[in-house]
Image (tube, coloured by chain):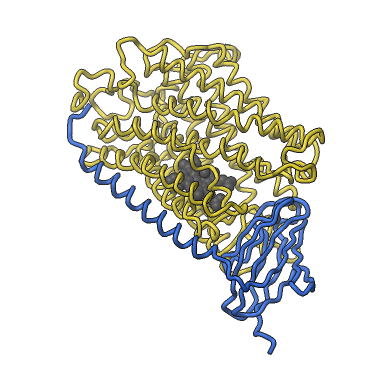
Chain colours: A yellow, B blue
Amino acid sequence: MVLELAKPRPIWQIMFSTHHTDVGLLYLITSLAFLFLGGTLALAIRAELFLPNIEGTGQIIVDSMTFNRIFTVHGTTLIFLFIIPFASAVGNYFVPIMVRYKDMAYPKLNAIAFWMIPPGGALIWLGFADFTWYAQPPYSIISAPGPAADMWIFGLKILGISSVLGAINFIVTILKCKHPDMSIGQVPLLAWSFLATSLIILVAIPTFAAALLMLLTDRLGVSGFFNPAMGGDPIAYSHLFWFTFHPEVYVLVIPAIGMMYEIIPRFSRKPIYSYNSGVFAFVLLSMVAFSSWAHHMFATGMSFTEKTVFMIGTLAAVPASAMHVFNFVATMWNGRIKFSTPMMWAVGGIALFFAAGAGGVVNSAMPLDFSTHDSYWVVGHFHLFVMGTIAFGSIGYLYYMFPYVTGRMYNETMGKIHFFLSFVGTILVFFTQHVLGLYGMPRRVFDYPPIPEWIAMNQIASVGAMIIGVSMAIFLYNMIYSSGKGKLADTDDPFGLGGKYYYPFESKTPHHTGY
Amino acid sequence: MSGHSNWPEWIYVAIVIALMAWVGAEAWEAERLVEHIPADAEVIKVTGQQWFWTFEHEDGTKEIGELHVEVGKAYKFEIMSKDVIHSFNIHDYVVLMDAIPGRINTVWFAPTDVGSFDIQCREYCGLIHYNMRGTLYVEEPSA
Ligand code: HEM
Ligand SMILES: [Cu+2]
Ligand SMILES: [Cu+2]
C-alpha cells in the first residue's frame, strides 16, 4: 500500500499524476469536500422545516424558490459528487492492487474521468437549479428558470460521461489486467463490486444521456419530445430517467457493500462466510436491476398490468440484496470480533440497510405505495440507503484506509463518538421521516400547515440532523488533525488484528487459512 | 469453493422468496379490488394548475380549492393538469394520482366519514407547491 503523506509532495505533482493512487486521492478529497458542502445544505433544509412559518416566525430561508434550489443541489451533489466519486476513490486505490496490476488499465483516461468532475460540480453549484434531482418535464421545460437549468443539464452530462469512462477502465482493469495466475473466481469481492457496478453503468447511463439531450432541445424550443404542448409526452422522460436511475441506485449501493465485504471478515477475524454467494448476489442484482424502474411511477396512471409487472420486477431484486445481509451476519457469527471504528460503521450500516430494504418492500406493494409515494416516507426510505448504508459503509472504509493512505492513525475515541452520534442521528431523522410520510406530509415542501404531529416529527428529524452535523464536525477535525499529527501507524497491522490479511487469491485452500 | 455446507443460506433465501411472493400476491389482490370503479360513481373533474385545484361536478358546478361531496357515495375523479405535473392527494382516503398535462387519469373513492380533510399536491410543481392545498368537505346527503 502507498503512503501519501509520509513524504509530502508538491500538490501539483499529485494533480498532474495519472498514477492510480494519486487519482484515487484526488477523487477522495473532492468527494469529501462535496460531502461537507452537500451536508451543509441538508442542515439548511432541516433548519427551515424545524417550525412551520406562521406570521414571520419559523422562516429561515428567504423564499421558497431558494429552498427548492437548495434541496435540488443537495440531492444532486450527494449522489453525483459525493457517493460516486468516493466509490471511484476506493476503486482507484484498491482495484489495481486487488487484481495485482501496476495501475488502472488506462491511466490517462482515468485522470480525464476524474478531471471531468470539478467542472461538472461547478456547473451544478454555480447554476443552482430548482427542478429537483429528476428535472421532470414539463416543469423543467416550461417553468424552470434560466441558465441554472441548462447548467445542471450540462453538469450532469459531463458527470455521466465521467462515470462511463471510469466504468470502462474498471472493467478492462479487472477482466484484462488481472494477474494471469488469478482466476476471476479469486478476485476479492470489493473488486467484484466494481465490476458489477461498471457493467450496470454501461447499460444504464446512455439512456439518461439521451434524455438529457432531448430535454435540452425541448428547452431550446426546437423539439417537443417531452412537452405536451408540442405533442410530446412527459411520462416518456420518466421512463428514460428511471430506466437509468433505478439501476443507478444499485450503482451507488454495491460498492458500499463491497467495502463492507472488506471490513467485516477482517474485524471478525474469519474468512467470508460465502464468497460465491457474494459474487452471485452482485451479478444477479446487476441483471434484475433493470426490471423494476417503473415502481417510481405507480401514480402516473399506469394500467394494473403494468404496475403488476414492475412490482414483480422490484420484489425479484430483494433476495439479491438480502443475501448480503445473511453473508455478513454469518461471517460475524462466532468470530472474534474487534469493534474498531471501521467495524462499527460497517455493522451499523448493515442494520440500516436491512431496515431500508424492509421499507422498500412496502413501497413496492402497489396499494401501499399510494400512501407512501412522494411523501416523506420516500425521503426516509432512500436516505436509509444513501446515508444509512452507503455513507456508513464509505465512512467506515475511509477510517479503514486512513492508516494506509496517511501512515498515521486517526483518533479511535473520536471515530467512535462520530459513529454513535451519526447512528442515533440517522435513526432520528430517517425513521421519523417514514412515519411523517404515513401521516401524509408531502416531500419537497418549503412550509407545512401546523398539524401538531407534523411539527413534532419535523422537530425530531431536525434535531437528528443537527446531531449528525456535530458528528461530522468531529470527523473533519479528526481527519485533518490525525493526517498531520496522528500517531504513526503500524501499516502491517494498523488495527492490531493479528494474523495476515488474506485475499482469496493468496490462499492455497480458500477456506480456513491464515486466521 | 465450498469448505462448509451452505444449507442455512438456502433456507434463508427460500424464506425471503416466499415472503416476497406473499407480499406480491396480497398486493395484487388488494390493488385489483381497489381499482374496480363502481358503475354508479359520480364523476368529478379535477384540474391542477400552478398552484391550485379546480373541481367540476357532473351538474357543471365548479369549486376552487374546496370540494364538497356526500358521505357514502362513490366518486370518480378525472384528473388533468393545465401546466406542469401535479399530484392530487387526499391522504386520509389514500387518494393519490398524478395530474399530467395531455392526459386524464382516474381514481375513485367513497368517503365514509363526515368531516373535513386535507387536499394537497404531492408532486413538486415549483414556487408554491408547498401551499397548493385545499379542503375536502364530506357532508350528510341533502335530503
Ligand atoms: C430492497 C431493495 C429496494 C426496494 C424494494 C426499493 C423500492 C423502492 C420503491 C418501490 C420506490 C418508489 C417509492 C415511491 O416513489 O413511491 C423507491 C424509491 C427510491 N429508492 Fe428504493 N428500493 C430498494 C433499494 C434501494 C436502494 C439500494 C437505493 C439506493 C441506494 C434506493 C434508492 C431509492 C431512491 C433514491 C428512491 C426515490 C427517488 C425519488 O423519488 O427521488 N432504493 N424504492
Ligand atoms: Cu427504484
Ligand atoms: Cu405540487
Q: Position of residue A502 (x, y in %)?
A: 27, 23
Residue A470 seen in the current view = no
Q: Residue furthest bottom?
A: B143
Q: Residue at x 43, y 40 (%)?
A: A414
Q: Residue at x 26, y 37 (%)?
A: A331
Q: Can you say whether A3 is above or below B125 in the image?
A: above
Q: Can you say whether A422 is above or below A453 in the image?
A: above
Q: Quadrant of the N terminus of chain A?
A: top left
The total number of labels drawn is 0
Picture quadrant of residue B141:
bottom right
Q: Position of residue A199 (x, y in %)?
A: 48, 26
Which sits in the foreground, A146 or A293?
A293
Q: Can you say whether B30 is above or below A408 in the image?
A: below
Residue B10 seen in the current view = yes
Q: Quadrant of the C terminus of chain A?
A: top left
Q: Is residue A125 left or right of residue A352?
A: right
